[in-house]
Amino acid sequence: MKLVSIGQNDLHACVELDNLSMGGFWSEKQWSEELSKKDSICLGLKESSVLYAIACGLILIDEFHLYLITVHPFYRRVGNGKRLLSGLLQAARGAGAQKVTLEVSTLNLEACSLYNHFGFKTKGLRRNYYRNGSDALIQWSDLNKY
């Protein structure tokens, strides 16, 4: 799989992968807006033009806000999430970000483990943040180490 920038041409593939792997976290309109934002960084893992993983975030001055990372269920636990997140963090640093932040569900143990691997530290909690009522950990990391 190849790490690539994704954009409006990948809209339908993003919506399809989102529905498959996250149950429709974002609508098609939200995906379209995210893929067209000037300060967004959206990367994917593709093979033969098929999208298997997505990661998106936004640069705000010197901070990168990681919004989403997902991998097709059949391609998890083989390093694709690490590869994708590493590429995204490097791109954010290359765009001038010095810190990165994200929210992750306290129930998403795989994601928590991934972020821990990259040195993220919990700095806060948002109660009942997600649709299912789960809390969100607010995590931060320093991009100067990537």
Image: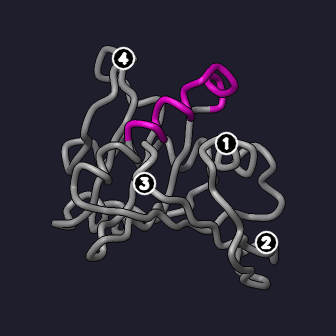
**Crowding at mark 4 (Cα within 10 Å: few <14, some 14-19, many 20+):** few
Q: Is residue 126 above or below residue 68?
A: below
Type of the residue with mark 1: Leu
Type of the residue with mark 2: Asn
Q: Are marks 4 and 3 in contact (CB under 8 Å)?
A: no
Q: Is residue 75 above or below residue 16?
A: above
Which contiguous range is marked in magenta? 73-87
Residue 20 quadrant: top right
Which residue carries the number 1 mark? 114
Single out the mark in the foreground, 4 or 3. 3
C-alpha separation, residue under disc 4 versus residue under disc 3 = 28 Å
Identify the disc placed on residue 12: none
Which residue carries the number 3 mark? 143
C-alpha separation, residue under disc 3 versus residue under disc 2 = 31 Å
Q: Are marks 1 and 4 in contact (CB under 8 Å)?
A: no
- Is 78 a magenta residue? yes
Which of the two labelled residues, at mark 1 and mark 3, occupies the earlier sequence position? 1
What type of secondary structure mainly makes up the magenta span? helix
Type of the residue with mark 3: Leu
C-alpha separation, residue under disc 2 versus residue under disc 1 = 22 Å
Which of the two labelled residues, at mark 3 and mark 2, occupies the earlier sequence position? 2
Single out the mark in the foreground, 1 or 3. 3
Residue found 83% across the figure and 59% down from its top: 107
Which residue carries the number 4 mark? 47
